[in-house]
Amino acid sequence: MAAGESPSHEKGQPGIVQAALSGLCPRCGEPTLFEAPARVALNCQSCQLDFTGLERGARLAGLVTIVTAAVLIGLSIGADMAFQPPFWLQVLFWGPVTIAAVIGVLRLYKTALLYAAYDAQTGDNKK
Ligand SMILES: [Zn+2]
């Protein structure tokens, strides 16, 4: 196999979206990746894989959060102009939506980064 960029989905590994939603460890596939909804655990409680060394792009998580929030603000302004809902309804709707979207995007972002770092670190040791 000519190795350049290795795809992040090897055989036996779940897709990134599935992994992000379930918080699956890139090595053992156990749902141990997140210790809180959008916080990566220090290591895998099942196989002891160290996640801290893999989470390199975490500095950008703040930026990802801001971009997500900006998109949501744009959407809420659009919805406001289109439907003119009462303020309490907007708060009721956009509060949970914002939290869910930010957590979802952060999980996806961190999982994708971590899996990419894991692939880079392990190289092609399973030929
Ligand atoms: Zn593991």
Image: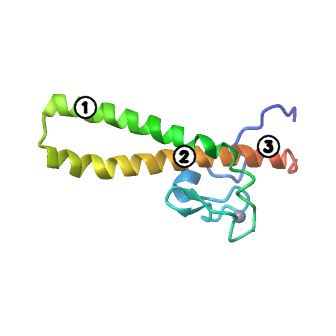
Q: Is the residue under label 1 in contact with that under label 2 (CB below 8 Å)?
A: no
Q: Earlier in the sequence, mark 1 or mark 3?
A: 1
Q: Which residue position holds label 2?
A: 108
Q: Earlier in the sequence, mark 2 or mark 1?
A: 1
Q: Which residue position holds label 1?
A: 77
Please give the label number shown on residue 124: none
x, y percent for residue 80: 19, 33
Q: Residue placed at 61% from the left, 49% from the top?
A: 111
Type of amino acid under label 1: Ile
| Label tally | 3
Q: Is residue 109 left or right of residue 97?
A: right
Local SS, label 3: helix
Q: Is the residue under label 3 in contact with that under label 1 (CB below 8 Å)?
A: no
Q: Nearer the viewer, residue 27 or 87?
A: 87
Q: Earlier in the sequence, mark 3 or mark 2?
A: 2
x, y percent for residue 2: 87, 32
Q: Residue placed at 75% from the left, 49% from the top?
A: 118
Q: Nearer the viewer, residue 78 or 13?
A: 78
Q: Nearer the viewer, residue 27 or 52?
A: 52
Q: Is residue 22 left or right of residue 56?
A: left
**Disc 1 residue lies near ligand 1 with CB under 8 A:** no
Query: Could you give the CA–CA distance between mark 3 and mark 2, rounded to whole angstroms?
Result: 18 Å
Decide if residue 15 is in sight here: no
Q: Residue placed at 49% from the left, 59% from the top?
A: 37
